[in-house]
Amino acid sequence: MAAFYQRRFRPEYRVALEAGVENRETGDSYVRVTVLLATVLLLTALAQRLKLTGPRLALLAIAFIMLAISSYSIFVYPRA
């Protein structure tokens, strides 16, 4: 159905459609980073509640790796 409408667009509207698709992909990427950062917060909170040092350090290590990936992603994504 979407392909049917895209074929019927005038050329000046196709430019706007392509820009909208690109913006949606960028927005999806930012949402993905937000979910990763929320997971970092969750893992950090869970690690604080653990009494044993081994599992606590394991959760914190995973959280730190996810934080590093999220931070890198934020810096390389385009800005408005």
Image (cartoon, grey):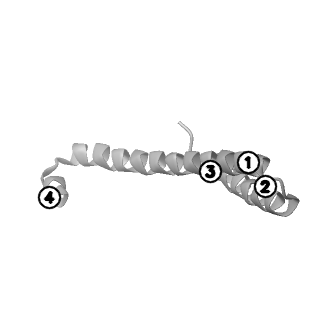
Name the residue rendered at 78%, 46% in the picture.
48
For image coordinates 35% across by 44% down, the residue present is 20
- Mark 4 or 2: the one toward you: 2
Q: Quadrant of the N terminus?
A: bottom left
Residue on which the image places disc 2: 60
For mark 1, does the 10 Å Cα neighbourhood hold few (<14), some (14 to 19), or many (20 or more) residues? some
What residue did someone put label 4 on?
Answer: 1
What amino acid type should be assigned to the residue bearing mark 1? Thr
Q: Nearer the viewer, mark 3 or mark 4?
A: 3
Which residue corresponds to mark 1?
44
Residue 40 drawn at (x, y percent):
67, 49
Disc 3 from disc 4: Cα separation: 37 Å
| Type of amino acid under label 2 | Leu
Whole-angstrom CA distance, mark 3 to mark 2, is 11 Å
Secondary structure under tag 3 reads helix
The reply to whether dot 2 and dot 1 touch (C-beta < 8 Å) is yes
Residue 56: x %, y % from top left? 81, 57
2 horizontally vs 55: left or right:
left
Q: Are marks 4 and 2 in contact (CB under 8 Å)?
A: no
Q: Which of the marked residues, 4 or 1, is nearer the chain's N terminus?
A: 4
Label 2 CA crowd tier, 10 Å (few <14, some 14–19, many 20+): some
Drawn side of residue 77 relative to residue 40, left or right? left
Q: Residue at x 12, y 52 (%)?
A: 8
Amino acid carrying mark 3 in the image: Thr
Give the mark nearest the N terminus, 3 or 1.
Answer: 3
Residue corresponding to mark 3: 39
Residue type, mark 4 in image: Met
Q: Residues within 10 Å of mark 4 (few under 14, many from 20)?
A: few
Q: Earlier in the sequence, mark 4 or mark 2?
A: 4
Q: Which residue is depicted at the point 78% across and 55% down?
A: 60
* Contact flag, marks 4 and 1 (Cβ < 8 Å): no
Mark 3 and mark 4 residues within 8 Å of each other at the beta carbon: no
